[in-house]
Image (tube, rainbow, N blue to C red):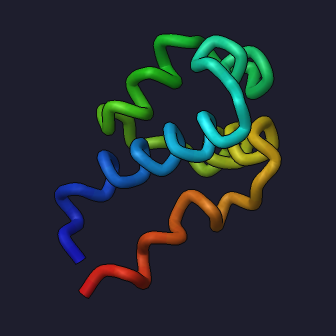
């Protein structure tokens, strides 16, 4: 596991799930009660999120927080 890429991989997964749910970044931010620029920085892998914000995003998208880490076991 390349821990250096973990924020980017997490952000990629947030973007993927957001798009599958049909949200824009702004819509997701509103639903999660976060700033749109914060969601953008998460998706770009620039943020080290708190557990609270991981849960806010998951609840807004309608997935479990674990869904953001579905790639974890797939890496060597």
Q: Position of residue 69 (x, y in %)?
A: 51, 66
Q: Where is residue 75 in the image (x, y as percent from the top left)?
A: 30, 80
Q: Quadrant of the N terminus?
A: bottom left
Q: Is residue 70 above or below residue 73?
A: above
Q: Quadrant of the C terminus?
A: bottom left
Q: Is residue 68 left or right of residue 66?
A: left
Q: Is residue 33 left or right of residue 42?
A: right
In this view, the residue in front, 38 or 68, is 68
| Residue name at image x 56 percent, y 12 percent | 36
Q: Where is residue 16 in the image (x, y as percent from the top left)?
A: 52, 44
In the rendered picture of this protein, how many numbered marks are placed on residues? 0
Q: In this view, does 75 lie above or below 15?
A: below
Q: In this view, does 30 lie to the left or right of 45?
A: right
In this view, the residue in front, 50 or 37, is 37
Q: In this view, does 71 lie above or below 53?
A: below
| Residue name at image x 56 percent, y 58 percent | 68
Q: Is residue 21 above or below residue 67?
A: above
Q: Where is residue 72 in the image (x, y as percent from the top left)?
A: 42, 75
| Residue name at image x 37 percent, y 35 percent | 47
Q: In this view, does 21 lie to the left or right of 14?
A: right
Which of the 4 image quadrants contains residue 11?
A: top left
């Amino acid at each position: 596991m390349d821990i250096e890429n973990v924020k980017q991989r997490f952000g990629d997964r947030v973007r993927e799930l957001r798009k599958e749910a049909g949200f824009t970044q702004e819509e997701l931010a509103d639903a999660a009660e976060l700033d749109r620029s914060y969601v953008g920085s998460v998706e770009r892998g620039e943020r080290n999120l708190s557990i609270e914000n991981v849960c806010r995003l998951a609840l807004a998208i309608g997935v479990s927080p674990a869904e953001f880490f579905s790639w974890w076991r797939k890496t060597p």
